[in-house]
Structure formats: C-alpha cells, structure tokens
Image (cartoon, rainbow, N blue to C red):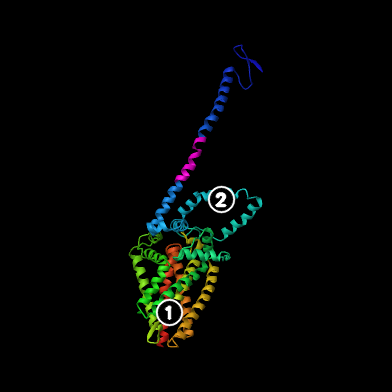
Amino acid sequence: MSEQNDDGRTWTGPLTASSPEDYEKKEESKVEFVEEEPVQAAPSEEPAAEPVKKETEDLDTLLKQGWDIVVAKVGEDKAEDLSDEEAMAIIREEDEALYNRIVSLSPKAEEKPAAEEPVQDVPAQEEAAPAETTALTETETRPAPAGNMEPVKNSRMRSINTSGIMGAIKCMLSFFTIIRINVDEKDMEAMDQNFWLAPVIGLITGIVGFIACLIFAMAGLSYILVPCVALASVYLFSKFLHFDGLADFGDGLVVSSGSQEDHVRALKDSRVGAGGLGVALTVVLLTLVAYMEFDNLFAMPIHNWTFAIGVPMAVLSVEVLVKYSQVVAASFGNPGNGMAANQVRNSDLNTFILSSVLTLILLAITTVIGWAMIRYSSLGAVGIPGWEIGLLFVLGFGMAIFVGMVMARYANKTFGFVNGDILGATNEISRCAILLLTVLIAGFIVVW
C-alpha cells in the first residue's frame, strides 16, 4: 500500500511503518534478531562435552577419597587384598554420602536406566506408585534425632522377606568372619532384610571357639590358657570387628561434653582414645576372668587328669546369645548412616520375635550338647547337672535381651542412632554380662 508523506514523497510499505526511516529501523531490528540466533547456538555446542569430562574427573576424585578411607580403616596392605565389593562396603560404612555419589557416577549406574527405559510402559508406572506410598508409611516424617540421619522407625511391624536367606547368611559370613566369599548387591540387600539370622553366625563362631578350646582342654592345659584361647579364637575369627566397635563406643561414651555432636564426633573418630582403651580393657578382662570361673565350676575328673569342659561349653552357647543381642539392639534402635543403617532400619518387633525363636532353637541344641558332655563324659561328677544347666541358658537369654535394649536406649539418647559401632559394642558387652551372670548363679547353685 502507498501513502504520501508530509514532504510530498510517495511511500510504499506496510501501514505499521510511518516512513522509510521507520521501516529501515524495523528491518534492522528484524535482522539483528535473526542474527542473534546463530550466535547463541554456536557457543552452546562447545561446552556440551565439558560435563562428561568433569563427571569423569569427579568420579576419579571420589574413588581416590574412598581409597583413602579404606586405607585409613584397614591399612594399605590389607586394603590391596580386598575385593571391590569389600572396599565399597567399608566406604559405605564410613561415609554413605560418598558411597552414593560413587555409585551414581559409575558406568553401571548410568547404563541401568538406559536399559530399563524401553521396557517401561504405562502399567509399570501405575504399579510403582503403591510401592512409594508403602515406603513412606514405614518411616516417620519427623526429622532424624541428630546430624545427617535417616528418618527413624515407627512402631509398625514390617513383613519379613525370607527369600534371600542363603544370600544373607553368605554375606554375613563374608562380613562378620574371616571367611572370604564373593558377594554382590543382592546378597547385601538380603543381609539387610534378614538381620534376624545373625545368631546363625554366632553358632558358627561358637563352633570354631568350641573346637579350639576343646583341643587345649583335652590336653590338660591350665585354666588360664584355655580361656585365653576362647577369646583369641573368637576375636580372630571375627576379624576383631566387634572389638573395634567396642573401642569406638568407649571413646564416644566418656566425652566430657554433654553435646550430642561431640559424642558422635568421638564415636566416629578413627583414633582410639583413653575412653576406648579403658572400656575395651575392662570388658576383656572381666570376660577372661568369667571364663576362668567357668572352669572352676565345671572342671570334670576323667581318669588321672581334670577335663576343663566349662569354657568350651560356654563358648558354644554364648556366641549365639551375643549375636542375638545385636539383633535386639537393632530392633529397638534408630538408624543412622553407615553400612549398618539398613540393617537397623529393617529391624523391628517382627525381627525381634523371629530372631528370638531362632535363638531359642539354637540354644536348645547347645544345651543338649553341653548337658550330654557333662552328664556322660564325667559320669555325673559335676555338681550342676540337668535342669540347672538349662536355667543358666535361660538366664543368659534374658541377659542378652536386657543388654540389647539398654544399649539401644542409651545409643538413641546419647548419639541419636544405633550404627555398626554400637552393634559391635553390644556384642562384646553382652558376652561379658552373660558370663558374669551365669557364673554368679552357678556359684550360688553350687554353694547352696
């Protein structure tokens, strides 16, 4: 369309432009807008490769940090002998945040979603929604009691998943003993879901200690050496794992400040202080003396020498009870960070009941073995036969429950959680308490 301007010239152009100058300005603005698009697109393609490079560098840095943690925990020589699964287990126990970052950046974590995307469809997404709702109902929404903790458990009982029993036992053997077994993530998840099976590992540990003590006892050696063999065989078979937790618990126990953060800091400090050393020595010495008293109460004359049956019989049953005490502490404790967090989180009243039944069955077996050895090997020469032996085991069972509940309550209040160190300390303290109570009651039975 054409128009005539004030100066008499005829202007042909759109109505939105009042003059050629105005039209040129609008055209220039269009040109500038069109030219800005390639300028923005060109530099955006170059940094696209930087996140991949940065992600690789981050993964290498995280792996180096994890390796430093493993070396600080077990030493460089032992760290080189560990498998990848065992090293990652240590990293997960010491720093779960670092473990999760390593897993998220690893190639396996990236490939897995890509493989699952084509398989997913609308029905699969609809089925996933109830699972999320269930997970939310299994934990409380209130914040954790201290630090960077996971939500604590509520009082609702979970259903027990027994499908991975063999995998759980295999993983427990690899983690709690010197037996080297290759385990995968599925086995670790099975262990977390079936921590009620811990007394089975206690029975295996007790059998090892029983055989070691029996060999030395049958050789007619002194009452001092056999109890030392009892403790040494158990500690070596368990890699001193629980003893380390006892020392860490001692450090966290004797902190002068009442601040929860200070208690947690001392608990997780890899260095052993005076508190850890003092608590560990006290528990070990009392345990050793209690084992010696067992031999005084259960020494049996056979031919021309005395058969010290007390310690081998005690080791067989006590190791079942101390693992059961760990389950009790996990069932009534609040989960924290670290590898034991999932075990504590998945343990509740249902776990406690199931483990109690299992422990009583195992105790019945060890009671029959102990009673048969005393009754028939000594030809009735021991002053505590029959039902008194069963009474001692029942009292030991009650003491295991008591120690587990007290440790869980104290840890929840002092540290805000129950972690692997607390479970290890529960293992050692319950052994000492059970032995002291047993020799005390047995002494009253003999005297009266």
Classify 27 as above or below 154: above
The dot on residue 76 is none
Q: Position of residue 371 (x, y in %)?
A: 48, 83
Q: Alpha-carbon neighbours of circle 2 within 10 Å: few (<14), some, or many (≥20)?
A: few
Mark 1: secondary structure? helix
Which residue is at 43% across, 79% downward?
Answer: 438
Residue 319 seen: yes
Q: Amino acid at mark 2?
A: Lys
Question: Mark 2 or mark 1: which is in front?
Answer: 2
Q: Specify the quadrant of the image occupied by residue 226.
A: bottom left
**Mark-to-mark CA distance, 2 and 1:** 54 Å
Position of the N terminus, as image quadrant, is top right
Classify 47 as above or below 188: above
Which residue is at 53% across, 50% downward?
Answer: 109
For mark 1, what is the residue? Answer: 438
Q: Amino acid at mark 1?
A: Thr
For mark 2, what is the residue? Answer: 112
Nearer the observer, 425 or 218: 218
Q: Position of residue 35 (x, y in %)?
A: 54, 27
Q: Is residue 131 left or right of residue 402?
A: right
Q: Position of residue 228 (x, y in %)?
A: 37, 74
**Residues rendered magenta in the picture:** 45-57
Q: Position of residue 33 (x, y in %)?
A: 56, 27
